[in-house]
Image (spheres, grey):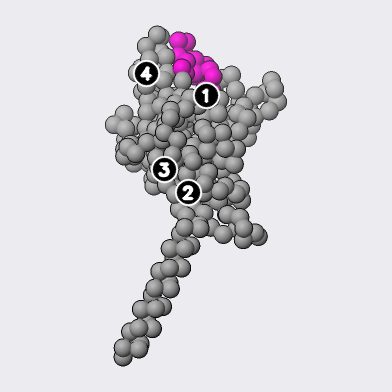
Amino acid sequence: MRRSVKILAIVAALVLAGYVAYSLIYPTISLRYRLTLDVDVDGVTHTGSGVVEVVYKFEPHPFNIDDFQFYPGHLHGNAITVDLGDRGLLFVVDTGSFLYDPGARQPFAPRYTNLRALPLRANDFDDGDPRPELVVDPKTIMAVKLNRQPIDFPPKELPMLVRFRFLGDPPSVEQVNPLDLASTFGPGVRLLRATFQITDEPVTPIPDIWPKWLVEYKDHPDLPIGSGPLMRVSFTTLLHRRDFKGE
């Protein structure tokens, strides 16, 4: 009996040691950050800010045991929201911009960024491109997590900005050009700055200013996205519930 107990204890210790070793080599790392947008409306600054958490997971690379298989992060939190008063609400959602510049004949944003990849973009790590086959070293994520300095983020590289022409009408959603908010919200509206900063603050809950249908947005069909008058969408895309609300 004692021998069996001893064997079980040894096996349990080996399993625990293996689990600890695996977790150290292939960690799951979470970080929280605050994204703040300052928008000028007729000379008055309107600020919208929110904290989200991103969980990054690493696993062995299927083709090279010396590398990591990087997954683009799981988001906890909600779209960053700026209340522009009678001009409406501006949202930063968890997907990349699909605006296309017909004059230059190229995508509007030089790099695809969503809320999950934004910490890497803010720190100039190009491997933040949200494709699971890309390899990112855990040290990179830790370096991002330890950098507590505020960072001014280029507006053109923000995740997708959207607004609803009519808050009670989900299909009225349209993408917003961050460099030309006036083309969507009317004269006198412009984005002043976007600021990124790592934080330990709790995740921001759904703002009270969200319309009821968006708060309860679970089983609605995906929303076809439109564009502002000065830009066009390069191809048809849809917004999903997870783009507004991470689990």
Q: Check whether the beta carbons of the residues at disc 2 and disc 3 lie within 8 A of each other.
A: yes
Of mark 4 and mark 2, the one earlier in the sequence is: 4
Tell me the CA gap for discs 2 and 3. Answer: 8 Å
Q: Relative to 191, is 67 above or below?
A: below
The percent coordinates of residue 33 (x first, y second) are 41, 36
The percent coordinates of residue 214 (x first, y second) are 37, 36
Q: Relative to 178, is 225 above or below?
A: below
Mark 4, secondary structure of its residue: strand
Viewer-nearest of discs 2 and 1: 2
Tell me the CA gap for discs 4 and 1. Answer: 16 Å
Tell me the CA gap for discs 4 and 2. Answer: 32 Å
Residue holding disc 2 = 56
Of mark 2 and mark 1, the one earlier in the sequence is: 2
Tell me the CA gap for discs 3 and 4. Answer: 27 Å
Mark 3, secondary structure of its residue: strand
Residue holding disc 4 = 46
At label 2, the amino acid type is: Tyr
Residue holding disc 3 = 31
At label 4, the amino acid type is: His
Q: Check whether the beta carbons of the residues at disc 4 and disc 1 lie within 8 A of each other.
A: no
Kindly identify the residue that appears in the image at 42 percent across and 14 percent down: 40
Kindly identify the residue that appears in the image at 47 percent across and 44 percent down: 142
